[in-house]
Image (cartoon, grey):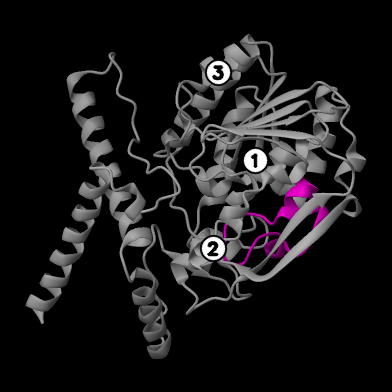
Amino acid sequence: MTRIVFGIMIAFFVSIIVCFVAIKLGAEDLFQMDHDIETKVYEITENDGNLDKLYKGYSNAVYAGKNYVDAYSNDLLLGRTTFVENAVRYKNLIGWKIYAPGEYNSILYLDNGYLASANGKETKEDIQKIATKIEGLRATAENAGAEFLYIQTPGNLDKYADKGLNEVKDFANYNTDLLISNLRSSGINCYDLRDTVHEELEDFHSLFYKTDHHWKQETALWATQEIAAYLNENYGLELDLAKYEPENFREEVLEDYYLGSLGKRATLAAVEPDDFTLLYPKFETDISFKTSKGIDVRGTFDVTYNREQIDAEKIYKRECYLGLLSFEGTGLSSVTNNQPENDTYILIVGDSMMIPVTSFLALDCEKVELIDPRYFEGSIKEYIREQQPDMVINTYSTTIIQDYYPIFDFE
C-alpha cells in the first residue's frame, strides 16, 4: 500500500512538472488558463539588505510553487473533476465532513446550504502594515488632486449574526474591524457597508451566492445606490440615485447555472448550482469598455459582459461573476459612459467585489475604472498621478484582509 501511495504521489508531481514545462515551452493552447498565476508576494527593492532579499526571494519561490501546483491540480490535470467528485461522494457516504483542498479550516458548510471559507487571525502588526500601505495610497491620491475613500464590503459571513462562526473558526471580521480602526485613527474616511447591510437588509446570506464568496449582481446594484448616496452626501457629487432602482433593469435569469469558486472546490457531488441573474438597464446606454487584456468595444451596457466566460458549456469552466466585467486575471478594466450626465471620473482600487459596482456607477459617471493590484502591470500610484481621477476608492472584502496578499501593493 505504501508503494502504491508513493507511486501516485510521484505521478502527480511529475504531471505537474510536465504541464509547467510544456507551458514554458509554448504549449499554452493545451492547458488553457484564463487568468495569470500569482508568483510574487514580496517586492524586492534595491534598499533591501542581503538577508531581506534572500528571505523575500525564498518566500516568492514558495508562493509561486504553491500557486502553480494549485492551478495545475485544480484546473489542468485530466480527470481531476471526476476524481474529486467521487472522493466527495465517498466522504458523504461514510459521513466524513472534512473537505479539501482549502486553507485555514477549509470550506465551511453552513446550516442553510451556503458555503463559506474561514480566515486566520492576523496580528495587530500585520494589520497595521496594511493600514500603512493604504495611507500611502491616500497620500498619492490627495497629492494628485483626488478625493479618497475606503469602502469596506462584507464577506459572506455576517459580522452580527454569525458570531459563533466568527469566534470559533473565522477571523475575517475581526481583522477588518482592526483595519478600519487603524484607518480611522489616521484620518481616512471609511464607509463600512457591513453596517448598512445590517441596518437596512434582512437574510444576510441570501445577498450572496450559495457556492461563491461574491455578492449577487442584484445585491451589487443595491450597494451601488448606497455608495452613490454616500458620495453625494459626503463628497458633493450629484449622481442620479433613481438610475439604480431595480425597476429600471430587466432581468435575465439563468437557472441552476452557476457554480462559484467554493462550489467548484466542493463539487456538484456536495452542492447544487446557483441561479445567476444578469441585469440590463431599460434606459438608453452608450458604453465604451476596455481592459488590460486587450478588450476594446463600444455598445450598450451589456458590452461589459463576457458571454464566453458566462456561457461556457461545462459548468466547472463558467466564470459567471468574473464575466460581468471580463475580470479574470485583468489588472485594469475601464468603463466609459459616452452620454454622461456628469464628468466624474472614479478610480477603484481593490478586489472583485466591485466588478458589478464599477459598471453600474458608470451609468451616471463619465468614467469608472477598476484596478486589481495583483494583476496590474506598473505602479498604481504612478497611474493615479498620470490620470488624475476625481476620486480614488480603495475597497476590499473582509475575506481578503490578510497581510501576505499582494493586493495591497500600490507601488
Q: Amino acid at mark 2?
A: Ala
Q: Amino acid at mark 1?
A: Gln
Find numbered disc 3 in the image and state the secondary structure of the residue it sits on: helix
**301 displayed left or right of 170:** right
Which numbered disc, 3 or 2, marks the residue that appears first in the sequence? Answer: 2
Residue beneath the point at 46% across and 71% down:
266
Q: Is residue 228 visible?
A: yes
Q: Read off the magenta span.
A: 199-223
Q: Nearer the viewer, mark 3 or mark 2?
A: 3
Q: Is residue 16 magenta?
A: no
Above or below — where is 388 with respect to 124?
above
Above or below — where is 7 with respect to 248?
below
The label shown at residue 116 is: 2
Which residue does the numbered mark 1 point to in the structure image? 152
Which numbered disc, 1 or 2, marks the residue that appears first in the sequence? Answer: 2
Residue beneath the point at 29% across and 43% down:
63
**29 displayed left or right of 247:** left
Q: Residue farthest to the left?
A: 3
Q: Is 367 or 297 nearer to us in this picture?
A: 297
Residue beneath the point at 28% across and 14% down:
46
Q: Amino acid at mark 3?
A: Tyr
Residue 48, by quadrant, is: top left
Find numbered disc 1 in the image and state the secondary structure of the residue it sits on: strand
Q: Nearer the viewer, mark 1 or mark 3?
A: 3
